[in-house]
Image (cartoon, rainbow, N blue to C red):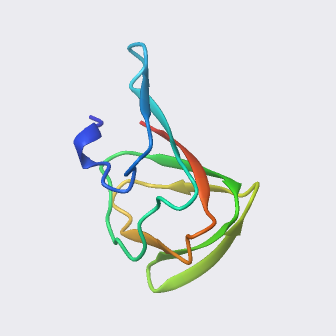
Amino acid sequence: MFDIKKIRHMRLGVMTQYSGSGFFAGKVPVGTHGEYDFHDHDFIELALVTAGSVTHLHQNRAHKLHCGDILLIAPGIVHAYCEAQTLEIYNLMR
């Protein structure tokens, strides 16, 4: 089950739960996303990059993401972001 307390990287974002669906959505505004904060989840995370760019790190790989890119992160995948100064993302989690 989704535990909102485990969302450390949603620092200044606002999480919204959709009535009884188990889905949560939130925005991480520009300049607020952590860097090199490796973590994992026990839920699925869908991230939509809505501004800027970022490097997503996982499994000793680095992938550059840009505005309009969508990232799907499975439960248990240890990951982090770097070069996130211009990043804005929206997350959908379940």
Asked if residue 60 is positioned above or below residue 29 in the image, the reply reads below
Q: Taking 57 as reference, is 13 above or below it?
A: above
Looking at the rendering, which quadrant does residue 21 occupy? top left
Residue at x 61%, y 62% (from the top left corner): 87
> From this viewpoint, which residue is outermost toward the right?
68
Q: Is residue 52 above or below residue 5?
A: below
Q: How many marks?
A: 0
Report the quarter where the N terminus lies: top left
Q: Position of residue 44 (x, y in %)?
A: 43, 46
Q: Quadrant of the C terminus?
A: top left
Residue 85 found in image quarter: bottom right
Extreme residue toward the top, this view: 19
Residue 70 x/y as whole percent: 67, 54
**Residue 59 is drawn in which quadrant?**
bottom left
- Pick the residue in front: 22 or 25: 25
Residue 73 vs residue 83, the one in the foreground: 83
x, y (%) of residue 72?
56, 54
Residue at the (32%, 54%) spot, across then down: 41
Residue at 56 percent across and 82 percent down: it is 62
